[in-house]
Amino acid sequence: DNSSAFRMSAKVPLVVPEINANAAKGSRLIANPNCTTAILLMALAPLVKLFGLRRAIVSTYQAASGAGAPGMNELTDGLKDKLAGKDIKNEVFAHPLPFNVIPHIDTFQENGYTKEEMKV
């Protein structure tokens, strides 16, 4: 399954074929991590194997395009407004995006991490 539906399920193996293909054996359904995690694991897996890496502190950056056309329109309109000296309106995003970096994406969970952080 390439969606996020089963990524956090303990009953469905989370598989990156280049790293843990054997986890898929005997399963009719497997999940894969999100794109950021899959790419990150390609770099970290050898470090785990060779040196026993146990923890990595990672920063990811999400594109406005992840919110689809409404997000891109809000960014474009906000840029135009900001450059024209007008106030920026934000409805799609929690904060105005033009000339800004938002320190988190998605909602915070009980453990203090956001949903997006939990995907990684």
Image (tube, rainbow, N blue to C red):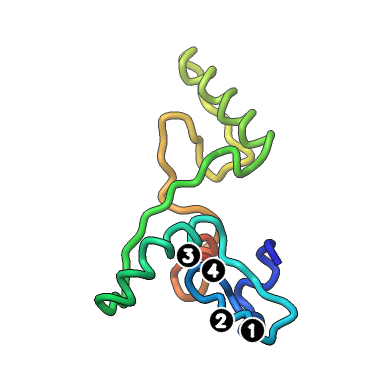
Please give left or right for residue 64 compared with residue 55 in the image. Answer: right
Counting residues from the start of the chain, the first of labels 2 and 3 encountered is 2
Q: Nearer the viewer, mark 4 or mark 2?
A: 2
Q: CA distance from mark 1 to mark 4?
A: 13 Å
Q: Which mark is residue 16?
A: 4
Q: Nearer the viewer, mark 3 or mark 1?
A: 1
Query: Which quarter of the figure has residue 35?
Result: bottom right
Q: Which mark is residue 22?
A: 2
Query: Residue 89, how many percent across, how many down?
Result: 57, 30
Q: CA distance from mark 3 to mark 4?
A: 13 Å
Q: Which residue is mark 1?
A: 25
Please give left or right for residue 51 compared with residue 72 in the image. Answer: left
Please give left or right for residue 95 compared with residue 92 in the image. Answer: left
Counting residues from the start of the chain, the first of labels 4 and 2 encountered is 4
Pointer 1 local density, CA inside 10 Å: few below 14, some 14–19, many at least 20? few
Secondary element under disc 3, as helix, strand or loop, is: loop
Asked whether 39 or 24 is in front, the reply is 24
